[in-house]
Amino acid sequence: MIAVAERINGMFKDVRRAIQKKDPGPIVDLAQKQTEQGAGYLDINVGTAAADQLSTMRWLIETVQGACKTPIAIDSQKLPVIQAGLEVCDGRPVMINSVSGDPEKLDVYMPLAVQHNAALVTLTMNVDGVPQNIDTRVEIAMTIVSKAMEHGLDMPKVFIDPIVLPVTVDQKQPIYICEVIKQIKTVLCDPAPSTIVGLSNISQGTSQRPLINRTGLVMLQAYGLDAAIIDVLDTEIMDAAISADVLMNRIIYSDSYLKSARM
Ligand code: THG
Protein backbone atom coordinates (compact mmCIF):
# COMPACT_ATOMS: atom_id res chain seq x y z
CA MET A 1 0.00 0.00 0.00
CA ILE A 2 1.16 3.50 -0.78
CA ALA A 3 1.30 5.55 2.42
CA VAL A 4 0.70 9.25 1.81
CA ALA A 5 2.08 10.99 4.89
CA GLU A 6 -0.33 13.58 6.31
CA ARG A 7 1.71 15.57 8.84
CA ILE A 8 2.90 18.50 6.71
CA ASN A 9 -0.45 20.23 7.06
CA GLY A 10 -1.04 23.75 8.39
CA MET A 11 -3.81 22.43 10.65
CA PHE A 12 -1.13 20.99 12.96
CA LYS A 13 0.22 23.49 15.47
CA ASP A 14 3.91 22.77 14.86
CA VAL A 15 3.54 23.16 11.09
CA ARG A 16 1.40 26.28 11.45
CA ARG A 17 4.06 27.86 13.69
CA ALA A 18 6.85 26.91 11.26
CA ILE A 19 4.92 28.49 8.36
CA GLN A 20 4.28 31.68 10.30
CA LYS A 21 7.93 32.03 11.38
CA LYS A 22 9.25 30.78 8.01
CA ASP A 23 11.28 28.30 10.05
CA PRO A 24 12.25 25.35 7.80
CA GLY A 25 13.44 23.23 10.77
CA PRO A 26 10.18 21.48 11.72
CA ILE A 27 9.26 20.95 8.03
CA VAL A 28 12.66 19.40 7.21
CA ASP A 29 12.33 17.21 10.30
CA LEU A 30 8.82 16.00 9.37
CA ALA A 31 9.89 15.36 5.75
CA GLN A 32 12.82 13.22 6.86
CA LYS A 33 11.03 11.37 9.67
CA GLN A 34 8.02 10.54 7.48
CA THR A 35 10.37 9.37 4.73
CA GLU A 36 12.20 7.07 7.19
CA GLN A 37 8.87 5.61 8.27
CA GLY A 38 7.99 4.53 4.73
CA ALA A 39 6.04 7.42 3.19
CA GLY A 40 5.43 6.87 -0.53
CA TYR A 41 4.35 10.50 -0.89
CA LEU A 42 4.56 13.48 1.44
CA ASP A 43 1.23 15.31 1.43
CA ILE A 44 1.67 19.08 1.65
CA ASN A 45 -1.31 21.17 2.73
CA VAL A 46 -1.04 24.85 3.70
CA GLY A 47 -4.44 24.77 5.40
CA THR A 48 -5.43 28.06 6.99
CA ALA A 49 -1.98 28.74 8.38
CA ALA A 50 -1.13 31.57 5.98
CA ALA A 51 -2.78 34.42 4.12
CA ASP A 52 -0.72 33.86 1.00
CA GLN A 53 -1.39 30.21 0.20
CA LEU A 54 0.48 30.32 -3.12
CA SER A 55 3.83 31.47 -1.79
CA THR A 56 3.43 29.28 1.30
CA MET A 57 2.83 26.19 -0.86
CA ARG A 58 5.94 27.06 -2.91
CA TRP A 59 8.03 27.51 0.25
CA LEU A 60 6.82 24.24 1.79
CA ILE A 61 7.57 22.27 -1.38
CA GLU A 62 11.01 23.83 -1.83
CA THR A 63 11.81 23.13 1.81
CA VAL A 64 10.70 19.51 1.54
CA GLN A 65 12.58 18.99 -1.74
CA GLY A 66 15.76 20.20 -0.04
CA ALA A 67 15.28 17.67 2.76
CA CYS A 68 14.51 14.36 0.97
CA LYS A 69 13.84 12.67 -2.36
CA THR A 70 10.33 11.49 -1.52
CA PRO A 71 7.52 12.17 -4.01
CA ILE A 72 5.13 14.99 -3.12
CA ALA A 73 1.33 15.25 -3.00
CA ILE A 74 0.17 18.84 -3.45
CA ASP A 75 -2.98 19.07 -1.32
CA SER A 76 -5.36 21.95 -1.97
CA GLN A 77 -8.93 22.51 -3.15
CA LYS A 78 -7.74 25.62 -5.02
CA LEU A 79 -6.38 25.35 -8.55
CA PRO A 80 -3.98 28.34 -8.24
CA VAL A 81 -2.38 26.74 -5.16
CA ILE A 82 -1.91 23.47 -7.07
CA GLN A 83 -0.41 25.36 -10.01
CA ALA A 84 1.95 27.31 -7.75
CA GLY A 85 3.12 24.00 -6.27
CA LEU A 86 3.62 22.37 -9.66
CA GLU A 87 5.77 25.34 -10.77
CA VAL A 88 8.44 24.60 -8.16
CA CYS A 89 8.43 20.79 -8.34
CA ASP A 90 11.89 19.50 -9.24
CA GLY A 91 10.92 16.57 -11.47
CA ARG A 92 10.37 13.94 -8.78
CA PRO A 93 7.01 12.08 -8.99
CA VAL A 94 4.15 14.33 -7.95
CA MET A 95 0.49 13.84 -7.07
CA ILE A 96 -2.23 16.47 -7.41
CA ASN A 97 -4.62 16.19 -4.43
CA SER A 98 -7.46 16.72 -5.26
CA VAL A 99 -10.28 17.52 -7.68
CA SER A 100 -13.99 16.70 -7.53
CA GLY A 101 -15.71 14.47 -10.08
CA ASP A 102 -17.41 17.37 -11.94
CA PRO A 103 -16.76 16.85 -15.66
CA GLU A 104 -15.90 20.57 -16.10
CA LYS A 105 -13.28 20.39 -13.33
CA LEU A 106 -11.85 17.14 -14.68
CA ASP A 107 -11.45 18.85 -18.07
CA VAL A 108 -9.12 21.36 -16.38
CA TYR A 109 -7.20 19.12 -13.96
CA MET A 110 -6.65 16.12 -16.22
CA PRO A 111 -4.69 18.01 -18.91
CA LEU A 112 -2.69 19.61 -16.09
CA ALA A 113 -1.86 16.16 -14.70
CA VAL A 114 -0.87 14.91 -18.18
CA GLN A 115 1.31 18.00 -18.75
CA HIS A 116 3.18 17.48 -15.45
CA ASN A 117 3.16 13.67 -15.65
CA ALA A 118 1.41 13.81 -12.27
CA ALA A 119 -0.88 11.36 -10.50
CA LEU A 120 -4.32 12.87 -9.86
CA VAL A 121 -6.56 12.30 -6.84
CA THR A 122 -10.22 12.57 -7.82
CA LEU A 123 -13.05 12.68 -5.29
CA THR A 124 -16.37 10.89 -5.80
CA MET A 125 -18.32 14.10 -5.31
CA ASN A 126 -19.88 16.50 -7.78
CA VAL A 127 -22.08 19.62 -7.88
CA ASP A 128 -24.73 17.69 -5.94
CA GLY A 129 -22.31 17.13 -3.03
CA VAL A 130 -20.86 14.04 -1.34
CA PRO A 131 -22.88 10.88 -2.00
CA GLN A 132 -23.49 8.61 0.97
CA ASN A 133 -24.50 5.51 -0.99
CA ILE A 134 -22.54 2.97 -3.06
CA ASP A 135 -24.12 3.47 -6.48
CA THR A 136 -23.69 7.24 -6.81
CA ARG A 137 -20.04 6.94 -5.76
CA VAL A 138 -19.49 4.28 -8.45
CA GLU A 139 -21.33 6.39 -11.06
CA ILE A 140 -19.02 9.33 -10.37
CA ALA A 141 -16.05 6.94 -10.55
CA MET A 142 -17.29 5.93 -14.03
CA THR A 143 -17.36 9.59 -15.10
CA ILE A 144 -13.80 9.98 -13.80
CA VAL A 145 -12.62 6.90 -15.71
CA SER A 146 -14.20 7.98 -19.01
CA LYS A 147 -12.71 11.48 -18.65
CA ALA A 148 -9.28 9.95 -17.96
CA MET A 149 -9.56 7.89 -21.16
CA GLU A 150 -10.59 11.02 -23.10
CA HIS A 151 -7.59 12.98 -21.78
CA GLY A 152 -5.07 10.16 -22.09
CA LEU A 153 -4.25 9.92 -18.39
CA ASP A 154 -2.80 6.51 -17.45
CA MET A 155 -5.39 4.67 -15.38
CA PRO A 156 -3.01 3.70 -12.51
CA LYS A 157 -2.19 7.42 -12.11
CA VAL A 158 -5.87 8.19 -11.48
CA PHE A 159 -6.49 7.81 -7.74
CA ILE A 160 -10.20 7.69 -6.91
CA ASP A 161 -11.10 8.77 -3.36
CA PRO A 162 -14.59 7.53 -2.36
CA ILE A 163 -14.63 10.00 0.59
CA VAL A 164 -14.69 8.28 3.95
CA LEU A 165 -17.37 9.51 6.38
CA PRO A 166 -17.21 9.02 10.17
CA VAL A 167 -18.52 5.74 11.55
CA THR A 168 -20.32 7.84 14.19
CA VAL A 169 -22.36 9.57 11.44
CA ASP A 170 -23.54 6.36 9.78
CA GLN A 171 -22.26 2.95 10.78
CA LYS A 172 -22.90 1.52 7.31
CA GLN A 173 -20.39 3.91 5.67
CA PRO A 174 -17.18 1.88 6.17
CA ILE A 175 -18.57 -1.23 4.46
CA TYR A 176 -20.02 0.97 1.68
CA ILE A 177 -16.51 2.32 1.06
CA CYS A 178 -15.16 -1.25 0.95
CA GLU A 179 -17.79 -2.17 -1.66
CA VAL A 180 -17.08 0.95 -3.77
CA ILE A 181 -13.36 0.14 -3.77
CA LYS A 182 -14.05 -3.44 -4.81
CA GLN A 183 -16.21 -2.28 -7.72
CA ILE A 184 -13.67 0.36 -8.85
CA LYS A 185 -10.91 -2.28 -8.82
CA THR A 186 -12.88 -5.03 -10.56
CA VAL A 187 -15.60 -3.73 -12.89
CA LEU A 188 -14.78 -0.28 -14.31
CA CYS A 189 -11.89 -0.96 -16.69
CA ASP A 190 -8.63 -2.86 -17.18
CA PRO A 191 -6.13 -1.71 -16.03
CA ALA A 192 -8.19 -0.37 -13.13
CA PRO A 193 -7.70 3.10 -11.67
CA SER A 194 -6.02 3.35 -8.28
CA THR A 195 -7.93 3.95 -5.05
CA ILE A 196 -7.06 6.19 -2.11
CA VAL A 197 -8.73 7.37 1.10
CA GLY A 198 -8.10 10.08 3.66
CA LEU A 199 -8.43 7.56 6.44
CA SER A 200 -8.71 9.48 9.70
CA ASN A 201 -12.24 10.75 8.97
CA ILE A 202 -13.47 7.24 9.70
CA SER A 203 -12.75 7.57 13.43
CA GLN A 204 -13.93 11.17 13.98
CA GLY A 205 -15.89 11.45 17.21
CA THR A 206 -14.93 8.00 18.51
CA SER A 207 -13.05 7.15 21.71
CA GLN A 208 -10.67 4.74 19.90
CA ARG A 209 -9.31 6.70 16.97
CA PRO A 210 -5.99 4.91 16.32
CA LEU A 211 -7.56 1.46 16.72
CA ILE A 212 -10.49 2.26 14.42
CA ASN A 213 -8.13 3.86 11.89
CA ARG A 214 -5.89 0.83 11.63
CA THR A 215 -8.71 -1.71 11.67
CA GLY A 216 -10.51 0.27 8.94
CA LEU A 217 -7.34 0.52 6.88
CA VAL A 218 -6.76 -3.25 6.89
CA MET A 219 -10.39 -3.86 5.88
CA LEU A 220 -10.10 -1.41 2.99
CA GLN A 221 -6.84 -3.02 1.88
CA ALA A 222 -8.59 -6.40 1.72
CA TYR A 223 -11.06 -4.86 -0.76
CA GLY A 224 -8.26 -3.49 -2.96
CA LEU A 225 -7.29 -0.09 -1.54
CA ASP A 226 -4.02 1.11 -3.12
CA ALA A 227 -3.15 4.21 -1.08
CA ALA A 228 -4.12 6.02 2.12
CA ILE A 229 -3.40 9.41 3.62
CA ILE A 230 -2.31 8.46 7.13
CA ASP A 231 0.01 9.34 9.99
CA VAL A 232 3.05 7.28 9.01
CA LEU A 233 4.69 8.26 12.33
CA ASP A 234 2.06 6.06 14.02
CA THR A 235 4.07 2.81 14.09
CA GLU A 236 1.04 0.68 14.79
CA ILE A 237 -0.94 1.78 11.74
CA MET A 238 2.10 1.38 9.46
CA ASP A 239 2.88 -2.08 10.88
CA ALA A 240 -0.76 -3.12 10.34
CA ALA A 241 -0.80 -1.81 6.75
CA ILE A 242 2.47 -3.56 5.89
CA SER A 243 1.31 -6.81 7.53
CA ALA A 244 -1.90 -6.67 5.47
CA ASP A 245 0.24 -6.30 2.32
CA VAL A 246 2.13 -9.48 3.31
CA LEU A 247 -1.09 -11.40 4.01
CA MET A 248 -2.48 -10.29 0.62
CA ASN A 249 0.74 -11.49 -1.05
CA ARG A 250 1.51 -7.95 -2.23
CA ILE A 251 4.96 -7.90 -0.60
CA ILE A 252 7.30 -10.78 0.16
CA TYR A 253 7.57 -11.98 3.76
CA SER A 254 10.93 -12.05 5.53
CA ASP A 255 11.61 -11.84 9.26
CA SER A 256 12.55 -8.19 8.76
CA TYR A 257 9.53 -7.33 6.57
CA LEU A 258 8.38 -4.38 8.72
CA LYS A 259 11.73 -2.73 8.17
CA SER A 260 12.24 -3.64 4.50
CA ALA A 261 8.77 -2.44 3.53
CA ARG A 262 9.67 1.03 4.85
CA MET A 263 12.75 1.34 2.59
N1 THG B 1 -8.93 12.94 0.91
C1 THG B 1 -7.97 13.53 0.17
N2 THG B 1 -7.14 14.47 0.68
C2 THG B 1 -7.28 14.86 1.97
C3 THG B 1 -8.27 14.27 2.78
C4 THG B 1 -9.10 13.28 2.22
N3 THG B 1 -6.45 15.81 2.49
C5 THG B 1 -6.69 16.37 3.80
C6 THG B 1 -7.24 15.31 4.73
N4 THG B 1 -8.35 14.64 4.12
C7 THG B 1 -6.14 14.32 5.04
N5 THG B 1 -5.19 14.89 5.94
C8 THG B 1 -5.39 14.90 7.31
C9 THG B 1 -4.42 15.48 8.10
C10 THG B 1 -4.53 15.43 9.47
C11 THG B 1 -5.64 14.88 10.07
C12 THG B 1 -6.62 14.34 9.27
C13 THG B 1 -6.50 14.34 7.90
C14 THG B 1 -5.74 14.85 11.54
N6 THG B 1 -6.57 15.71 12.15
C15 THG B 1 -6.73 15.72 13.59
C16 THG B 1 -8.11 15.18 13.89
O1 THG B 1 -8.84 14.83 12.97
O2 THG B 1 -8.46 15.07 15.06
C17 THG B 1 -6.57 17.10 14.19
C18 THG B 1 -5.21 17.65 13.95
C19 THG B 1 -4.82 18.75 14.91
O3 THG B 1 -5.47 19.82 14.86
O4 THG B 1 -3.89 18.55 15.70
O5 THG B 1 -5.10 14.07 12.19
O6 THG B 1 -10.00 12.71 2.87
N7 THG B 1 -7.82 13.15 -1.09
Image (cartoon, rainbow, N blue to C red):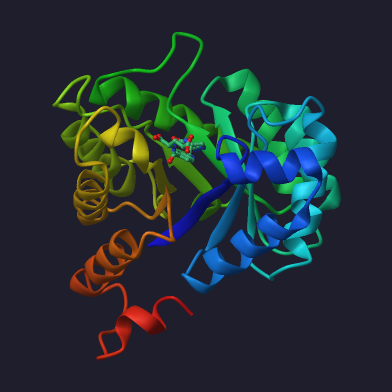
Residue 181 visible in image: yes
User: In the picture, which quadrant includes the N terminus?
Assistant: bottom left
- Total residue callouts: 0
Looking at the image, residue 66 lies above or below residue 12: below
Q: Percent x, y for residue 75?
A: 62, 39
Viewer-proximal residue among 20 and 157: 20
| Residue under the image location 41 percent in, 31 percent down | 142
The reply, left or right, for residue 56 in relation to residue 236 is right
106 versus 6 height, above or below = above
One can see residue 45 in this view: no
Q: Position of residue 131 (x, y in %)?
A: 34, 17
The residue sitting at 21% across, 32% down in the picture is 206
**Quadrant of res 198:** top left
State the image coordinates of residue 153 (x, y, percent, origin top left): 61, 46
In this rendering, position of residue 232 left or right of residue 257: right
The answer to whether residue 36 is above or below residue 82 is below
Reply above or below: 216 against 202.
below
Q: Position of residue 156 (x, y in %)?
A: 49, 54
Identity of the residue drawn at 32% across and 51% down: 225
Question: What residue do we see at 32% from left, 79% from top?
Answer: 258
Task: Name the image quarter holding residue 99.
Answer: top right
Q: Is residue 139 left or right of residue 152?
A: left
Residue 188: which quarter of the image?
A: top left
Farthest residue, direction top? 128
